[in-house]
Image (cartoon, rainbow, N blue to C red):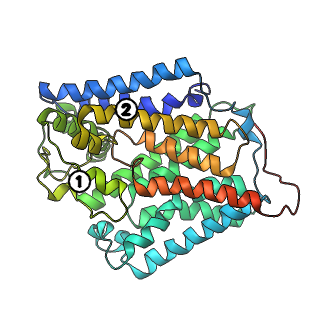
Amino acid sequence: MKALIRFPSFYFSFPILLSCAVMFATFDPPSTYLAGVLLLVCIAFIAIGADIVLKIRLPEIYKFRELDFSGSREALVVLAFCYVIIIFCLIDITFFPIPLFGDPSTYATFDGGREHIRHISDMSWILPPVALLCLRNKVLRNLFIVTGFAFPIVVLDRNRLFAALFSFLLILIFRRKSNKRFPWKTVGFFGFSGAAGFSALGILRSGTLSYIFLPFSNFYIEAPLSIKWLLLYTSAGVYNFSAILAKEYQNSEFLLTQLLPFHSAVATAATDIPLDAKTINVGTEFFPFLMALGPLGVLLSALCLYIMLLWSVRLLRGRISIFSILIFLRLAYVCIMSPFAPQAFTWTNLGFLFLCLFLKILASILPVRKKQVGETYA
């Protein structure tokens, strides 16, 4: 396992292959849908082959163990940014409805300026990893960690909860002591907690799933409701992707909405897109490219995403910076979530990457007041 997590394709290919496998456990799809699954499987194996040929790996794990950015210029900048995020989280839950304690349907309501507030508060996922790497004060560290997990729960944002959980766990794994085995118990506990939290939030947000009619397998039909949520969320993106490929549906508006900040939003549930179930509207990272550009667009977007991931890995091959870690965590996460929904090719995600690069430059030009404890070289 220690060797696998250094491979970029571990974050890119494994989730795609897993999601394709779960799709066949969840659905009995028409034979015409198999071409979409085959396309995704080929993309996953191409990335694995590229890993073998290019031999680009994350730094050896031991180089992450003693990282401590506390007291450094980078810590000063990233902590200031984190305090801004916490302030926006407080604004979000103070001036707008809290879905967990009120009407769960308000989780998707962004009127009255909440959409702009959420662009900042959504970055709460960085609080747990920053706490582990930049804070020695236990009170502040726990505050950051609790906020990073609590905010997504109260606003019923499963995606941000998963992002925080993934980043937190990966940093724990990277920083484990050399004489300790892989922390399967810790990973299992947090994985189970995340799955349980996801199912609970799904039930709160959308109910019992009894209103959904799709060609489900017997295994899915007989599964408990909590398991059904996990199966459906894991596989629905691949199912919808394959369905739209088979139906040869074209619509470029969804891709434009992702890439252009001021382009009018398009709700997949409120259009003529021929989904087999209108309320199940996820479709993989490559779904908008499929509708806009066809299979060639899918291949090009997958290649671009893999290259972005390789770039983030190369950033860690020089001096390990808190900002290069955040860039890698973000790109690794969007790769893991690529079988489910678009996140990488959005203007907000690209903006986060540019913001990290800007903050890294800002930290580098600040005056040095003392020895930079966290500036460890790989």
Q: Is residue 26 left or right of residue 356?
A: left
User: Is residue 304 among the parts visible in the rendering?
Assistant: yes
Residue 144 position (above or below residue 283)? below
Q: Amino acid at mark 1?
A: Glu
Image position, residue 95 (x, y; %): 42, 82
Q: How many marks?
A: 2
When asked about the image quadrant of residue 336, the answer is top left
Q: From the viewer's perspective, tell me whether residue 160 is left or right of residue 251.
A: right
In the image, residue 94 sits, relative to residue 185, either above or below, namely below
Tell which circle, 1 or 2, labels the residue nearer the N-terminal end: 2
Q: Residue at x 57, y 58 (%)?
A: 355
> Foreground mark, 1 or 2?
1
Q: Residues within 10 Å of mark 2 (few under 14, many from 20)?
A: many
> 256 above or below 25?
below
Q: Residues within 10 Å of mark 1 (few under 14, many from 20)?
A: some
Q: Nearer the viewer, residue 19 or 81?
A: 81
Quarter of the image where one finds residue 236:
top left
Nearer to us in this view, 213 or 123: 123
Q: How far, Cα to Cα, is label 1 from label 2?
A: 25 Å
The residue located at (68%, 32%) in the rendering is 59
Residue depicted at 59% across the width and 59% down the height: 127
* Amino acid at circle 2: Ile
Disc 1: which residue? 253
Question: What is the x, y in percent for residue 55?
Answer: 59, 22
Q: Which mark is residue 137?
A: none
Q: Residue furthest right?
A: 370
Secondary structure beneath dot 1 equals helix
Residue at image position (46%, 49%) is 193
Please tell me the numbered disc located at residue 16. Answer: 2
Look at the image and tell me in which quarter the N terminus lies: top right
Q: Quadrant of the C terminus?
A: top right
